[in-house]
Image (spheres, helix red, strand yellow):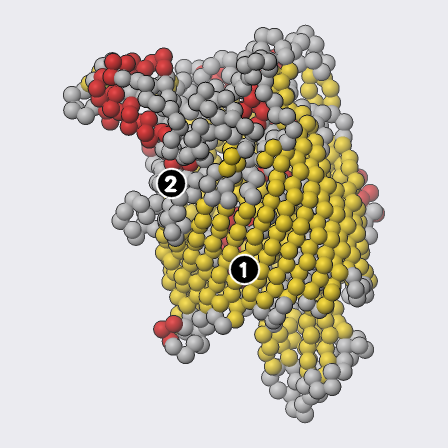
Amino acid sequence: MRKLLLISLTLISFIFAAEMGRIQGKVTDASTNEPVPGANVYLEGTEMGAAADEGGNFLIPFAPAGTYRVTASCMGFNPVTQDPVVVISNQTTNLHFKLSTTIYQIQPTVVKAERAVVIRTQTQTSHTTTAADISKMPISAINQIISLQAGVSQSELGTHVRGGRANEIAYFVDGVLTKAPHYGEQSIQVNKDAAEEISVITGGFDAEYGEALSGVINIVTREGSEKTSGNVRYTTDEIFNTSKLNFGYNLYEFNIGGGLMTKTRFRYFLSSEAYLTDDYEDAKYKLYSPRFDYKLQGKVSYRLPNNKAKLIVSQFYSREQFMHFGDGGSLSMMFNLDRQSGETRKGWLTTLTGNYQISGTDLLELKLGYTRNTRFYATRDMALEEEEGRKWYEDYIYKANHFPAILLSDIPDTVKKAYLVDSLCDTLMPYHYQEFDRYSAATLRRNPFGATSFFYTVGDYRLWRYFFNRDLQANLTMTNALGKVHELKTGINIFQQNVGWFDNNLPWTKLPFWDMYNKNPFKLAFFAQDRMDFEGIIARIGLRFDYFDSKAEGLAHPTDSKDTTMIMASPKWRISPRLGFSLPITETSKMRFNYGYFFQTPTAHDLYRSTTPEVVWLLLKRANTVLGNPNLTVSKTIAYEIGYENQVSDIMAFGFTAYYKDIYDLIQTKSFFSLPYTYYKVENVDYGNVKGFEFTVKKRMQNFWSADLSYTLQFAKGTASSSWQAYYTIYYAENIDPITGQYRLPQGDFWLDFDERNIVNATMGFEIPKDFGIKPLAGFFSDFILSYHSGFPYTPTDLRGNQLGDQNSARMPSWLNIDANITKVVSIAGINLSLFANFYNLLNSQQITSVYSVTGRPDDDGQDVTISVSDFGDISMTSAYYTPQADYDHDGLNSDVELYKEYLKARHFTINNPYNWRPGFRSRVGFGFSF
């Protein structure tokens, strides 16, 4: 590892730091419009600045992303300050200072700096939200901002960018990749008050970004400013005395930052958040699913004199802990919630960044990042928790985590196997899992629910799972800004992972679905990129090289228990070109075009699951076994995009983007004939293609209001919507053609499950300044977020489950949502006090997310009730199947009539599954103060 790093250092030349932008512009005489050579331009509160050349032009190349006051001054002229100036990472902010002559030095003239709506240097589609924007929106998490951007949709499978699968997005925090390897999901979710800037890149991302097929989310966390400032907020819905509005929601937020000692050099920022609720589920009404999360973030930076070097250390920790009410939308455990699964997630992120400005145009940067994530998913030991008096901020105690799960990564495989398989079903052990029983047709005469419902009332949930990843990243970068035209970039990224998985899917049996692996994949990437900024064209031309050694291995012949021959996966490498062009037409309008190849490595679970001999040979004794595939290759997207942007006035701009992309070598399950059971394996066999059109309109805050509108028209097709779709909808469901006797495999591509034809997102803000003449109205502001979605597709069937028409040929109903925030701010002795109210689904509209394939409705499965009173028998209270809520006369007996009535109620409840709808109207209020 050390040798590789030393070799890589010699290959580095020029690179641009991902969390920095640059400021350039011109200083002129206001009366003559002539340049003012030698004028000083500097960022107040920092030691960063530049002097204008003979033409009055200046360049500040390495400004960290954020908001600044920028001042231009020169002897014989009045200073001018522009405020606020927003610097966006990896982009150029253009400023023009007009200085007026004077005999005496006076206080600088402050000019309100408007952030450019059309960024002439931007060649890709990128949507940036700043800390100031976040503070005014009715949101509680960063992911809500992401879902509001053009081209982004949200389905039950996750977040999708331009018709891609949920695992095709790369998430970066301060330039460090935070993507959990097991499933490819976001691993670190920063609290919103800790974010300085959120960039959502939906097309044409530069060569410096890898591990993404659809989009890049880049979060830059806040640094302290010269002046100490802070904020405290509390949000709740517990003031309401009705269960329709009181969900036990409480959110506590605190942050503080500033400078210490030499305030321009040493800065700090601290942020924390605690979130408690009785119901975190997105469902039609309140479901008991408690959640207790907290997050802590700290960042310290020190800048050496003369702005020659800077050191930044940051640390993030989160603990998310919750209980599931339903499992994948199922209500099967609702009468046995104490034995339902709980989940504890922990995340660590540590970054160390050091940069050194070799000269005014050269910046060398080294960034080290360490991420660690753990997940525990199992049945809680409620008795032990009650005995110990566990509080909300303490971790759950799970059955079988009496044995320290973290040690599973270090103990011998034989011990792991004994622990995961044998001990969990040992009735003599204190953490023994009890097999659960459900109401089914076979037990109809002893229960009230019948064959159409599957409520588990006896025993534990069927899963014990612990998995983790530890990622160490090293990024070495160097920037060389060659004047105004060229910005040369090259870089190296070294990524060493440790990925572990320990799982038992039937803990009470000696022949469970179980698995374990502990692997150490290695990744290496180089990239080179040149940004050429000419008068009439800006070009970004880049090339990226990715190398991936999965260290995966598996049996050459898994069905032959006598053949122990192992095959080792060979390393994979790819080269991806990236081209982007921006053609300014006027000072406020441009055309742009980009094209690129984008690659992504398979998820750890697709590579490693069920590949060790002991696991494979045991699992092949069971049906429905899915094996990983060490020989998987990387997936590839080829994408094209063209766009136009025009700022038609000082306050209004619009733009449109058209895009097309082909996606190859996506992962899917395939069946392989074997005795005694057919097994399944993942392969690179899926394909997708997406085309779409996006239209945006922006209006700046003026005359007390602002607006931001986006419309997305999209067509996303493919051979499958997820890597397990064939397994669940074809093989496991035994979807067999009655004529041919073969599985009904899809012929060609179809509309993907997350294909939404039309999406409209609009944000409208109203703001009355603090100095407004009518004092009772001063300091009021509000934000309204409107979203329209045309509905996801589904496949219609008849009552027997036979498919009618093409796959995904029907559409769910469209829906409209409006969220709002209303805030009043009062300033007292330098402290801003705020009172606010947030409203969600303001119109209480019906927002359907799932329907029955027979009727296309969320509350009618098309089936008739065929069960009568005679199908039930009496159940005494001594039976494990006795149901207290069905004992209407409290005689200690469930009679056949009582059970029948309870069955009808249960069936009605089950058919009207609350997960088929998004939440109705909700309201929260709060207060805070800032200084």
Label at residue 284: 2
Residue shown at the point (80%, 59%) measured from the top left = 532
Q: Amino acid at mark 1?
A: Asp
Query: On the rendered image, what quadrant is the N terminus found in?
Result: top right
Does residue 775 sit above or below 678 in this rendering? below
- Which SS class for mark 1? strand
Q: Nearer the viewer, residue 542 or 617?
A: 542
Q: Amino acid at mark 2?
A: Lys
The single residue placed furthest to the bottom in the displayed view is 103
Q: For residue 331, which quarter of the picture?
A: top left
Residue shown at the point (49%, 49%) measured from the top left = 788
- Which SS class for mark 2? loop
Label at residue 708: 1
What distance separates the C-alpha of mark 1 from that of mark 2?
A: 29 Å
Residue shown at the point (51%, 44%) measured from the top left = 790
Label at residue 898: none
Residue 317 location, x and y as percent?
A: 53, 45
Residue shown at the point (45%, 35%) measured from the top left = 850
Residue 165 location, x and y as percent?
A: 60, 37
* Mark 1: few/some/many CA within 10 Å (<14, 14-19, 20+): some
